Image (tube, grey):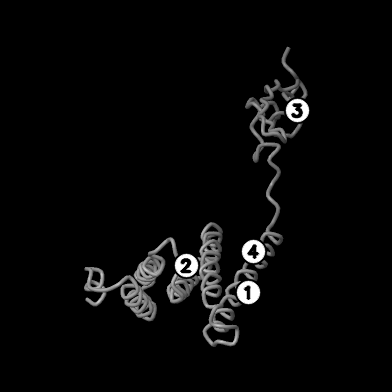
Amino acid sequence: EALRIREDGNGSHLDVAQVAVSLGSLTVEMAIFDAARAFFDLALRNYTFDESADAHPRAAHALAGLARVRRHQGSKMLQQRDSLSARRAGLLVLDEAINFQAQAVRSRASLGQRHGLYQASVAELRAMEAQRDQIHRAMKSADADAPPSPPSSMAASSPERGSPLREISPSGQVRVIAPTAPTLAECRGSPANTPRNGNPAPPHD
């Protein structure tokens, strides 16, 4: 209700941003991360409403909130170990979180390096970067330990006689090899011409 009142024109952009940050923090605690992201996005837009001026110093609250949300969402995706595409997408989301946190650090640099908020922001940024680097190393190690894929230059299964062979060149071009007729020796030794005693039957005249 407070946010609605301020958005209706009864509050400044900073008032709207402040309420949106509070709601974002509340929904993070409730683990409603999509709603939290929307609130922090709204706060950031209001903190940077005047594009001709620098962002308000309090914009760091919205940036840090977005970093926290995106880190959680990226970590959730990275837990899907059976899906490589989901893990790669999770890394991209984690990179987005790191970018938001880096902006929060720059915004709070004006507070001084001894300020508690600045030091906490730097520590959070370093933790995110360490998490990303660890995941990168784990994924590279998994790729190195994976069994080699079968060669793609020939077909995976041998075709039956009479079927055309297909050969794939390194450039990706497919060459069809015409089937060859069976030889006389193969005909003599074929199951159809071999009696039960195991000796090949004499050829017909």
The relative height of residue 26 versus residue 144 in the rendered view (above or below) is below
Residue located 72% across and 36% down the image: 170
Q: Contact (CB < 8 A) between labels 3 and 2? A: no
Please tell me the numbered disc located at residue 130: 1
Give x and y (percent) for residue 152. Answer: 68, 40
Frontmost of labels 4 and 2 is: 2
Helix, strand or loop at mark 4: helix
Q: Residue furthest top?
A: 205
Q: Amino acid at mark 3?
A: Pro
Q: Given this view, does label 3 or label 1 mark the residue nearer the observer?
A: 1
Residue 147, how many percent across, how many down?
69, 56
Residue in the foreground of this view, choosing between 203 and 25: 25
Is disc 3 placed on a helix, strand or loop? Answer: loop
Q: Which residue is mark 4?
A: 139
Marks 3 and 4, how far apart at CA: 59 Å
Which residue reaches farthest front?
Answer: 52
Residue bearing mark 3: 200
* Distance (Cα) linking label 2 and label 1: 30 Å
The answer to which of marks 3 and 1 sits earlier in the sequence is: 1
Type of amino acid under label 4: Met
Crowd tier of the residue under label 4, counting other residues whose Cα lies within 10 Å: few below 14, some 14–19, many 20 or above: some
Amino acid at pointer 1: Ala
| Marks 2, 1: nearer the viewer | 2
Q: CB of mark 4 within 8 Å of CB of mark 1?
A: no
Quadrant (top left, top right, bottom left, bottom right) of the C terminus: top right
What x and y, as percent, mark residue 33?
39, 71
Question: What's the residue type where badge 2 is placed?
Answer: Asp
Mark in the foreground, 3 or 2: 2
Query: Neighbour class for label 1 at 10 Å: few (<14), some, many (≥20)?
Result: few
Can you tell which mark lies on residue 54?
A: 2
Query: Which label's residue is closer to the chain start, 4 or 2?
Result: 2
